[in-house]
Image (cartoon, coloured by chain):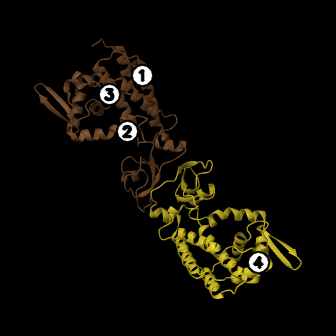
Chain colours: A brown, B yellow
Amino acid sequence: MTQCDDTIFHTARDALMRTGDTRVWSVIVTIFGDLAPDPQDQISGTTLSDLTRMIGIKPEAMRVALHRLRKDGWISSEKSGRTSSYRLTRQGFEESLAARPRIYATNAGRPGQWHLLLREAQPGASRGKAQARELAPGYLMLMDRVFLGPGRAAGDQGGFVIDGSAASVPDWVKNTVIPEDRAQDYVRLYQDLQAVQAVVQDAPQLSELQVAVLRVLIVHNWRRCILRHADLPDAFFPEHCPAVACRALVGQLLAWLQRPALTVI
Amino acid sequence: MTQCDDTIFHTARDALMRTGDTRVWSVIVTIFGDLAPDPQDQISGTTLSDLTRMIGIKPEAMRVALHRLRKDGWISSEKSGRTSSYRLTRQGFEESLAARPRIYATNAGRPGQWHLLLREAQPGASRGKAQARELAPGYLMLMDRVFLGPGRAAGDQGGFVIDGSAASVPDWVKNTVIPEDRAQDYVRLYQDLQAVQAVVQDAPQLSELQVAVLRVLIVHNWRRCILRHADLPDAFFPEHCPAVACRALVGQLLAWLQRPALTVI
């Protein structure tokens, strides 16, 4: 292995840690989701310690998070002599799998299809956002009794379904589905990803562990943006919200920073 | 001219006059719209008297209605010796022309296209049906801030336009756009049109004047149903509302009862 460029790594890592409000258990979920997504994939305790330490997570915080994830049935652990190893449980695998399409989709591969669901007025029925909780996941309230759903409507949602087709989406609709603070999250993420792109694009020599850390941080930051709102067709993102540009850059960076095999981390 | 069958005429006419709440000026509008639709078409006072008398309108009521329509700028009159003749004014022609597509459309010729218009919430803005008045004509309120419009949206309505495409329209939407009393109007009309069909289909010998009277009554009754609500795509009529069947039967009857030339009435 050639000599590693720590300056480049630190620049990229610090850009991705700028916002700095990463919850430890959530980072570990990202680690498994990106580096050990299958139930047979194992990560050793040593590797987990190295990865989290490089993200600034204290050993004690990691142990607490691992304990919580085991208790919640997300991961399981095995002890072999002095070393522990961890893997996703069936439940952890399935929840991780469900989120993958949204996190790893490319812009080209995203369906533009959406639909509206209009619900009947019901006396004494829940109002506002509480209505959405009665619907299948993925619906987003545009206005009272009107919901935006991804793809085509699945089954009978008990409403009036209109397959989406619109020449343009007005700003007030975009600002309804992506509030301003969500849009600003994407603005910050795009800046951070560009900072990473600037240092990584000269194909620097990074260690496998450094590559793994950068991948985890990229996926984690992206995941925190994209999974925070319903699966919107690209036409619904406000003009100043660079979600589509972020998705392109995430894809490019993950292609550059090829996932290292766990055995060599 | 062959002998006329008064029994058949009276049966058909009485069926069409069953509901009997015909306003005289409105019947005269129908007479011009169907029998003298162009500004150069003239109807003599004698012909108008014959037609309205056969519909059960008293001479005095006809004179009052003609006076009102002249005053409103719908028709103009000319005197030549002892006889008067009447024709549509430019305004009367244009208003009549605007309604023709909906009255005389065939089921096959009707566009299935529709669209939804979602309006932005505005503080202090009008609520409910008052919102529709701020829109171009032809919109029908489905729910607060949601409107159904015919065809494709014309120009900028200041809202979120979604071209209509739906696998099915649920009953509560149909019952919103066609209230029960409107649906019952169609049920009665369909019965009446079938009664006319039953006697007229044997190609009876009717006088030109009788044909004209039946046409006027058919168009008038149909017009009173179809122009009483927004121009709905057929998919939006409730199951028990035979509007589409009525349209087919109106077309068939008007084809059988060919419009007589005014000079021979």
Residue with the mark numbered 1: A197
Is A254 situated above or below B7?
above
> Residue farthest to the front?
B2
Going by the image, does A36 lie left or right of B14? left
SS at circle 2:
loop
Q: CA distance from mark 1 to mark 4?
A: 87 Å
Calculate the distance from the C-alpha at mark 2 to the C-alpha at mark 4: 76 Å
What is the spatial separation of the Cα atoms under label 1 and label 2, in whole angstroms? 23 Å
The amino acid type found where label 4 is placed reads Val
Q: Which mark is residue B264?
A: 4
Q: Residue at (34%, 13%) from the top-left corner?
A: A5
Q: Are marks 3 and 2 on the same chain?
A: yes
Residue type highlighted by circle 3: Val
Residues at badges 1 and 4 in contact (C-beta under 8 Å)?
A: no
Amino acid type, callout 2: Leu
Whether residue A21 appears in this view of the structure is no
Q: Name the residue located 31 percent from the left edge and 22 percent from the top edge.
A: A211
Q: Nearer the viewer, residue B261 or A243?
A: B261
Spot occupied by residue A132 in the image (x, y as percentages of width and height): 40, 51
Local secondary structure at mark 1:
helix
